[in-house]
C-alpha cells in the first residue's frame, strides 16, 4: 500500500531525534496497527487495546460535545433576551459555541499531548493513550469563558504533577481531568464559581452590559453570514437583559430549595439541558446515552455507576428526612438530574486507573462518592457542586478499599483448614 | 429496591406532619453515630488483627461483612455439580469435524528435557547418537535426582543430541522403528507397598508423566500428594475431545485410576464436563475408586487448576498431583502389559490446516511429518498445544512432552490500516466494542498479531471476568513484579499455573505477558521455598 510505504520512508531516526520519533510513532500506530506478533505467551490476543478502549470513551461523549458547544451560544443569547427558542439563531449560537470551544480543545491537547510526547521521548517508551480521554474531558468540565492561559497552566499542572510525576498512564492516583479542574477551582476561583462564569461572552452579567466580540465573530463569521443574508453578531444589540442572573440550579437551590429552582427553570429544562453550567454536563439524556454505551461495550464499570446511584439515593433520603433547610428538602431523586452528577458518574468516577481495582471495591468506591458528593453539594455552601471533590477524595481512598478487600482474600486463603 | 426507596422517601418526606422533624433528625444522628463508632471499632479490630498476623497470631475469624460480600461472587455449587459463571470460549475455525482417529507412525520423535519445569539445563544423557533403544529404556535423568528416569517413548536409533544455548540439551532425536520393541518390566503386585510402586514408576519413566502442583514440576520421589486430580475435558480452543480418546481404552483408564489411588493419602478426583452429561464416555461417568465432580461453564472450566480450586484448594505446603487422561491410560496400560506404550491421540487443528483431524502417534512426534501436505502455504505458526497456553514449535520441530494438540494458525505480521478502530477482519474479543456480542456462535480465523502494544495496567476487573477462581489476578501480578513472596502466596499463586491465566493474558487490554510473569513468580517461589 502506498501510504504505508510513504509513512515508513519518512520515519525519523530514533537515536538522533527521539522526540520526533516518539511523535512519529504515536501517529504511525494511530494510522496502522503494528505488525508485532505474540511471542512467548498466548498466540492469539483479543482485538481490544488501549487505543480502542480510550477512543470508545471519547465516542461516548460526542453528543455531550455537540450539545455543549451549541449551548454555549444558546446561553449567550438567552442572557441578551435574543433568540430565546432553543433552535432560533442556530448559526449564531453554533458559531459562538465553536469560537469558545475549539480553542479550549486545541489548547488542552497541545499542552497535554506535548507534555506526554516529551515525557515519552525522555523515558524512551511509546506515547500512551491516556490523554485521549483526559483531553476530551477537560473542555467539557470547564466554564465557557475560561481564559486559555489558565487552562494551559491547569492542564500542564495536572499532567506533570498528577500523572508524569507518578510514572505516566496507569500510575496516577487522581483523575487528571478533575485535577485540572480543581487547580482552576482553587487557583482562580473567580473564573469558575459564582453566577457570571457560566454564561459566555460578557464581562459581567449586569443588566445592560454588552457582548464582547472579537475578530472571529465580527470578521470571520459575520462576513460569511452577511454574504448569506443571515443575521449577524451585533455587539451593541446583544445586551444582558434586566433580571437575568445566570445562576445554575444548584446555586438557586442554596437560596430556596426546589421552589427557587422552579422559579427559574422547569424540571424539563434541567433534564434536557439548555441551562447554564459546565460545558458538557447540562444535557442529561445525552450523558445517559453515553453511560449506556459505556456499560454496553463494557468499557466502564457499571458497578461504580450503580454504587454512585445508590450512594446519592441513600444520602438524599437521609437529607430529606433531616430536612434542616430548603436544600435538604429537595427530593432525593432530583439530585440525580441536578448539577453534574450524571456526567461525573459516567465519565469521571469510572476512570479505571484511579478507581478501586476490585469488583467489590468498586461498589464501595462508587457508593461513597455518592455519599461524599451529595454531602458537599448540600451541606457546604462554599462549593456549589460536590462531585469533583468527592471523586478526588475517593481516588485517595481507593487503594485503601482495595487493601482491605485483598487482605480479606489473603486471610481467607491462609486460614483454610 | 427502588420501590422500597420510594416508599421510604414518601413516608419520611410527607409523613413529617406526624413525626416531628427533630425526632427524626436525632434518631438518624444516633444511627450515624452508632454506625460511625462501630466502623471505628471494626477498623481498630482490623488493625490489631493485622498486627497479630505479623506476629503469627490468628485473632479472629471472618467478619459478617466479609461473609455478606462473599454472597456477591457468582459461582454456585450443589453437591458435586459446580456451575462456573465466569470465563470465555474462544471459538476458532479449524476444528476437527469427524471423530475418526487414524494411526500415523512418524519416523522421528524427540525428547525435550526443557519441557520439564525446574530440570537442570544439562541433564545426564545416558545414550549416544547411533545407539538403539527400546520403548521404556532410560534416555536421560536430572543429575540432582538420578533415581527419576526419563525413558524413551519409542524404540529405535538415537539420531542426535541437539544442544541449545550454553550447551543445554534441547532435543534428543530418535529414529523410530517400523516395528516397535518394548522393554518388559516386572509389574509390582496389587498389594505391593507404596515404595515398590514408586520405584517401578521411576524405573519405567512413568513418574515423569505426573505433574505436581504448585509449580508444575515432576514430583520428588518422597513426595506424597494430598489429592490427585484428573480433568477429563479440555475447554481450550480447538482442544481434542477426550471422550473419543478414551474410547477403546476404558479398562486401561480405570486401571490407571486404580494405580493412582494407591499413591495418594487423599482421594483421586475426576472432573467431568457438566454441560454435556449425556455425551460423556462411560469410562468417565462410571469410573470407580474416585470422586466425580461435574463442572459446567466456559473455558477455563476444564482446567484442572480451576477444578482443584473448587473441590479441594491447595493450602499451606500441600502438594497435589495432576495427570492428563492419556497419561492415565498409558499408566493403566503399563500396569496391564508391563510395557511403556504412550501412543497419544493428537488433534491437528487450526485455520491453516487443510483437513483438521485426529491422529494417533508417538509423543514428541515430528511436526513436519504430522502436517505433511495438510497445511496451507504462507507464513504459519505451529503451536504444540492450544493457542492460549501452547508453545511455538518450528515447522520442522517436534511436539512437546505431553501435548495432545497441534495448532497451526496464521502468523499475523502485517500492518492494518486503522486496525484498532475499524478492523477489516472479524476477531475474537470479550469486549462489547466489537459486534461479536450479536453473533455468539461465530467462529474466527485466528492470527498471531498482538492487536496493539504493551501498556501499563489500566483496565481493572477484566481478568476476574475470565478466571472463575476467588483470586485477584491483577494484585497477584503486581505482587510478582514486586517479588513479595508473602503477598504472592496469600493471593494464591500456588493455585495457579500458566494455562489458568492464559485467558487473562488473551483478554488483557494492556497486552501484558501474564503467563511469563506467573512463571517468573512461581520460579521465584520455588527458589525461595
Image (cartoon, coloured by chain):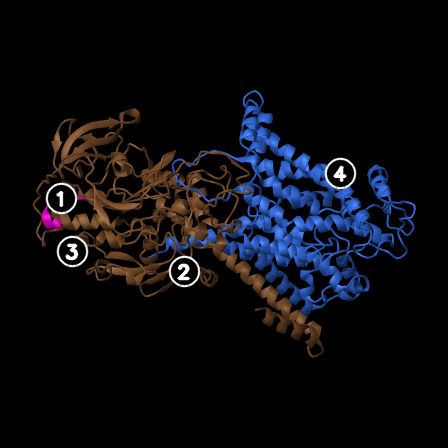
Chain colours: A blue, B brown
Chain letter of the residue carrying label 1: B
Could you say which disc has been placed on residue B128 in the image? none
Give the residue at mark 1. B199
Residue at x 21%, y 58% (from the top left corner): B283
As displayed, is residue B13 above or below residue B65?
Answer: below
Mark 4 and mark 2: span between their CA atoms? 53 Å
Mark 2 and mark 3: span between their CA atoms? 34 Å
How packed mark 4 is, by other alpha carbons closer than 10 Å (few <14, some 14-19, many 20 or more), is: some
Same chain letter for marks 3 and 1: yes
Same chain letter for marks 1 and 4: no
Mark 2 and mark 1: span between their CA atoms? 42 Å
Same chain letter for marks 4 and 2: no
Chain letter of the residue carrying label 4: A
Disc 1 is placed on an element classified as helix
Discs 1, 4 touching: Cβ within 8 Å:
no
Give the residue at mark 3. B251
Could you tell which of marks 2 and 3 lies nearer the N-terminus?
Answer: 2
Give the residue at mark 2. B75
Of A89 and B403, nearer the camera is: A89
What span is in magenta? Answer: B335-342
Dominant secondary structure, magenta: loop
Same chain letter for marks 2 and 3: yes
As displayed, is residue A280 above or below residue B33?
Answer: above
Discs 3, 1 touching: Cβ within 8 Å:
no
Same chain letter for marks 4 and 3: no
Give the residue at mark 4. A148
Which of the image's four quarters has the N terminus of chain B?
A: bottom right
User: Which mark is in front, 1 or 4?
Assistant: 4
User: Which mark is in front, 4 or 3?
Assistant: 3
Across and down, in percent, residue A223 comes to 85, 39
Which of the image's four quarters has the C terminus of chain B?
A: top left
Say whether residue B322 is left or right of residue B75.
left
Amino acid at each position: 500500500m502506498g501510504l504505508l510505504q510513504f509513512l515508513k520512508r519518512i520515519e525519523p531516526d530514533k537515536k538522533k531525534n527521539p522526540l520526533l520519533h516518539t511523535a512519529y510513532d504515536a501517529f504511525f500506530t494511530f494510522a496502522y496497527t503494528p505488525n508485532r506478533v505474540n511471542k512467548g505467551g498466548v498466540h492469539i490476543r483479543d482485538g481490544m487495546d488501549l487505543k480502542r478502549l480510550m477512543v470508545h470513551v471519547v465516542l461516548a461523549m460526542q453528543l455531550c460535545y455537540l450539545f455543549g458547544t451549541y449551548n454555549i451560544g444558546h446561553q449567550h443569547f438567552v442572557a441578551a433576551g435574543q433568540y430565546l427558542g432553543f433552535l432560533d439563531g442556530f448559526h449564531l449560537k453554533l458559531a459562538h459555541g465553536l469560537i469558545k470551544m475549539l480553542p479550549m480543545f486545541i489548547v488542552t491537547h497541545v499542552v497535554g499531548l506535548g507534555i506526554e510526547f516529551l515525557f515519552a521521548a525522555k523515558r524512551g517508551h511509546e506515547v500512551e493513550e491516556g490523554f485521549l480521554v483526559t483531553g476530551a474531558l477537560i473542555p467539557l468540565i470547564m466554564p465557557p469563558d475560561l481564559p486559555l492561559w489558565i487552562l494551559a497552566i491547569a492542564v500542564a499542572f495536572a499532567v506533570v504533577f498528577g500523572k508524569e510525576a507518578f510514572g505516566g498512564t496507569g500510575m496516577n492516583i487522581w483523575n487528571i481531568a478533575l485535577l485540572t479542574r480543581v487547580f482552576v477551582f482553587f487557583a482562580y476561583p473567580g473564573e469558575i464559581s459564582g453566577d457570571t462564569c457560566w454564561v459566555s461572552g460578557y464581562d459581567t452579567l449586569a443588566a445592560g452590559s454588552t457582548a464582547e466580540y472579537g475578530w472571529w465573530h465580527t470578521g470571520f463569521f459575520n462576513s460569511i453570514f452577511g454574504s448569506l443574508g443571515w443575521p449577524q453578531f451585533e455587539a451593541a444589540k446583544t445586551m444582558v437583559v434586566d433580571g437575568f442572573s445566570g445562576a445554575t440550579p444548584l446555586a438557586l437551590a442554596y437560596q430556596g430549595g426546589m421552589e427557587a429552582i422552579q422559579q427559574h427553570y422547569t424540571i424539563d429544562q434541567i433534564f434536557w439541558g439548555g441551562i447554564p453550567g459546565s460545558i458538557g454536563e447540562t444535557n442529561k439524556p445525552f450523558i445517559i446515552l453515553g453511560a449506556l454505551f459505556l456499560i454496553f461495550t463494557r468499557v466502564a464499570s457499571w458497578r461504580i455507576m450503580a454504587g454512585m446511584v445508590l450512594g446519592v439515593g441513600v444520602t438524599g433520603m437521609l437529607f430529606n428526612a433531616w430536612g434542616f433547610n430548603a436544600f435538604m428538602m429537595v427530593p432525593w431523586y432530583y439530585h440525580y438530574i441536578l448539577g453534574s452528577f450524571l456526567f461525573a458518574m459516567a465519565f469521571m468516577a469510572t476512570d479505571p486507573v484511579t478507581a478501586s481495582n476490585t469488583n467489590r471495591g468498586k461498589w464501595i468506591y462508587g457508593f461513597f462518592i455518592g455519599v461524599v458528593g451529595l454531602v458537599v453539594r448540600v451541606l457546604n455552601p462554599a462549593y456549589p457542586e460536590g462531585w469533583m471533590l468527592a471523586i478526588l477524595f475517593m481516588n485517595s481512598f481507593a487503594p485503601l478499599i482495595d487493601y482491605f478487600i485483598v487482605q480479606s482474600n489473603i486471610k481467607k486463603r491462609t486460614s483454610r483448614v | 429496591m427502588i420501590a422500597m426507596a420510594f416508599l421510604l422517601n414518601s413516608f419520611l418526606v410527607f409523613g413529617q406532619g406526624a413525626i416531628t422533624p427533630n425526632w427524626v433528625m436525632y434518631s438518624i444522628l444516633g444511627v450515624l453515630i452508632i454506625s460511625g463508632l462501630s466502623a471505628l471499632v471494626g477498623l481498630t479490630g482490623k488493625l490489631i488483627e493485622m498486627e497479630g498476623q505479623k506476629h503469627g497470631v490468628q485473632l479472629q475469624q471472618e467478619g459478617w461483612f466479609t461473609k455478606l460480600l462473599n454472597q456477591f461472587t457468582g459461582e454456585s455449587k450443589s453437591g458435586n455439580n459446580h456451575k462456573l459463571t465466569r470465563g470465555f470460549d474462544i471459538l476458532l475455525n479449524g476444528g476437527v469435524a469427524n471423530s475418526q482417529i487414524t494411526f500415523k507412525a512418524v519416523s522421528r520423535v524427540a525428547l525435550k528435557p526443557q519441557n520439564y519445569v525446574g530440570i537442570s539445563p544439562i541433564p545426564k544423557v545416558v545414550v549416544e547418537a547411533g545407539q538403539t533403544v527400546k520403548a521404556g529404556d532410560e534416555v536421560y535423568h536430572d543429575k540432582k535426582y538420578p533415581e527419576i528416569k526419563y525413558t524413551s517413548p519409542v524404540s529405535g536409533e538415537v539420531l542426535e543430541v541437539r544442544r541449545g544455548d550454553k550447551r543445554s540439551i534441547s532435543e534428543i532425536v530418535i529414529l523410530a522403528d517400523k516395528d516397535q520393541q518394548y522393554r518388559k518390566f516386572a509389574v509390582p503386585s496389587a498389594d505391593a507397598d507404596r515404595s515398590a510402586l514408586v520405584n517401578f514408576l521411576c524405573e519405567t519413566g512413568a513418574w515423569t508423566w505426573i505433574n505436581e502442583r504448585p509449580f508444575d514440576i515432576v514430583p520428588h520421589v518422597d513426595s506424597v500428594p494430598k489429592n490427585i486430580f484428573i480433568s477429563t475435558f479440555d475447554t481450550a480452543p480447538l482442544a481434542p475431545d477426550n471422550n473419543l480418546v478414551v474410547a477403546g481404552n476404558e479398562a486401561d483408564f480405570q486401571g490407571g485410576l486404580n494405580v493412582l489411588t494407591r499413591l495418594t493419602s487423599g482421594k483421586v478426583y475426576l472432573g467431568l464436563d457438566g454441560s454435556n452429561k449425556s455425551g460423556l464416555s462411560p469410562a468417565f461417568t462410571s469410573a470407580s475408586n474416585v470422586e466425580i465432580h461435574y463442572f459446567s461453564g466456559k473455558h477455563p472450566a476444564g482446567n484442572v487448576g480451576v477444578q482443584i480450586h473448587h473441590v479441594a484448594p491447595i493450602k499451606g505446603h500441600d502438594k497435589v498431583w495432576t495427570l492428563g487422561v492419556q497419561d492415565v491410560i498409558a499408566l493403566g496400560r503399563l500396569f496391564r502389559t508391563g510395557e511403556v506404550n504412550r501412543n497419544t491421540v493428537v488433534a491437528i487443528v487450526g485455520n491453516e490446516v487443510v483437513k483438521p483431524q485426529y491422529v494417533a502417534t508417538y509423543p514428541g512426534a515430528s511436526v513436519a511429518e504430522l502436517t505433511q501436505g495438510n497445511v496451507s502455504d504462507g507464513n504459519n505458526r505451529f503451536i504444540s498445544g492450544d493457542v492460549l497456553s501452547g508453545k511455538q514449535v518450528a515447522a520442522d520441530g517436534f511436539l512437546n512432552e505431553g501435548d495432545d494438540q497441534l495448532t497451526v494458525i496464521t502468523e499475523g505480521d502485517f500492518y492494518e490500516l486503522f486496525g484498532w478502530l475499524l478492523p477489516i477482519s472479524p476477531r475474537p474479543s470479550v469486549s462489547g466494542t466489537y459486534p461479536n456480542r450479536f453473533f455468539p456462535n461465530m467462529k474466527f480465523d485466528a492470527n498471531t498479531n498482538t492487536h496493539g502494544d504493551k501498556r501499563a495496567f489500566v483496565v481493572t476487573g477484566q481478568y476476574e471476568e475470565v478466571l472463575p477462581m476467588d483470586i485477584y489476578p491483577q494484585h497477584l501480578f503486581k505482587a510478582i513484579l514486586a517479588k513479595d513472596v508473602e503477598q504472592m502466596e496469600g493471593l494464591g499463586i500456588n493455585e495457579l499455573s500458566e494455562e489458568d491465566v492464559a485467558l487473562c493474558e488473551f483478554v488483557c487490554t494492556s497486552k501484558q505477558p501474564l503467563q511469563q510473569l506467573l512463571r517468573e513468580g512461581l520460579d521465584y517461589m520455588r527458589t525461595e521455598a
